[in-house]
């Protein structure tokens, strides 16, 4: 899309304003580099659209495409200009936490995206031993209700079928509660006390979940409504 203006905001919008573009950059910033991994983080994008957007980002110099050595396919990496978008996306995310997340519909609660984020959030150095298995059961889902994270050394795999390993920690909850806990909208302690989350496992893991499952980078940012309420309460 061309706006026909010299304003730098309009020029940036010409590059970044198309549907999916910022989310592709988000995934690349979070470490995705292969086509199928990008698709995991952009669940409803078509392969044709993803290919088109990646080619556009390569053409404008934000992304570099490299052949995978000895394999079919390519990897995609942000160039310095693409990496410079990190604080831009962080600022957009902060704004979204404050102003755009009220009344999120059930249709936006994506279990596959949540599990990808949880996979990326496991701090393997905070776990004991060479292997840890975490099971999630979402009580409100009919499909894709059972998930496992298998942590081996510093590698994390997500499974939708029982890996046949002894489980160390069990999470039983509904999808919205787990998203809210990871996003920081509710604490794990509060979710447990309100009987929205059942957590079973050794105390060394269940008492400090947020230490080994790192919360969202937007954790702790209150919605604008809460800020306004607090200011009113303080007489400001």
Image: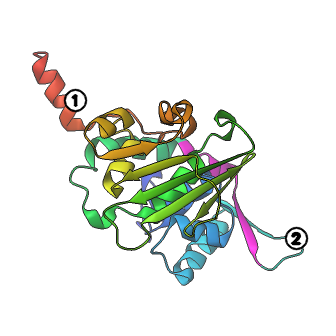
Where is residue 14? Give x, y as percent: 47, 64
Where is residue 81? Give x, y as percent: 64, 51
Give the residue pinned by disc 1. 227
- Residue 80 covered by magenta stretch: yes
As rendered, which of 81 and 27 lies closer to the eye? 27
- Residue 58 covered by magenta stretch: no
As rendered, which of 179 and 126 lies closer to the eye? 126
Residue 69 has which mark? 2
Label 1: few (<14), some (14–19) or many (≥20) C-alpha neighbours in 10 Å: few
Where is residue 86? Give x, y as percent: 56, 45
Label 2: few (<14), some (14–19) or many (≥20) C-alpha neighbours in 10 Å: few
Quadrant location of the C terminus in the rendered image:
top left
Q: Which region is colored magenta?
A: 73-86
Seen in the image, is 196 located left or right of residue 11? left
Q: Is residue 187 visible?
A: yes
Looking at the image, tell me whether mark 2 or mark 1 is earlier in sequence order.
2
Rendered view: 65 above or below 114: below
Q: Secondary structure at mark 2?
A: loop
Q: Residue furthest bottom?
A: 48
Rendered view: 192 above or below 68: above
Q: Secondary structure at mark 1?
A: helix
Q: Is residue 15 visible?
A: no
Residue ID at (10%, 16%): 235
């Amino acid at each position: 899309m061309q706006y026909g203006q010299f304003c730098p905001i309009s020029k940036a919008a010409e590059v970044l304003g198309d549907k999916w573009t910022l989310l592709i950059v988000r995934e690349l910033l979070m470490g995705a580099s292969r086509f199928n991994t990008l698709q995991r983080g952009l669940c409803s994008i078509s392969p044709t659209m993803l290919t088109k957007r990646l080619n556009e980002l390569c053409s404008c110099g934000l992304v570099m495409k490299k052949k995978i050595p000895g394999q079919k396919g390519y990897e995609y990496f942000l160039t310095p200009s693409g990496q410079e978008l990190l604080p831009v996306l962080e600022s957009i995310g902060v704004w979204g936490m404050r102003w755009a997340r009220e009344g999120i519909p059930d249709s936006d609660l994506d279990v596959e995206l949540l599990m990808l984020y949880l996979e990326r959030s496991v701090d393997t150095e905070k776990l004991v031993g060479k292997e840890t298995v975490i099971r999630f059961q979402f009580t409100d889902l009919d499909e894709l209700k059972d998930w496992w994270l298998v942590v081996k050394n510093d590698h994390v795999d997500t499974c939708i079928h029982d890996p046949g390993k002894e489980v160390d920690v069990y999470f039983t909850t509904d999808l919205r509660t787990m998203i809210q806990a990871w996003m920081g909208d509710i604490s794990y302690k509060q979710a447990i006390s309100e009987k929205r989350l059942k957590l079973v496992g050794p105390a060394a893991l269940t008492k400090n979940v947020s230490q080994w499952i790192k919360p969202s980078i937007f954790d702790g940012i209150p919605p604008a409504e809460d800020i306004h309420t607090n200011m009113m309460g303080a007489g400001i």
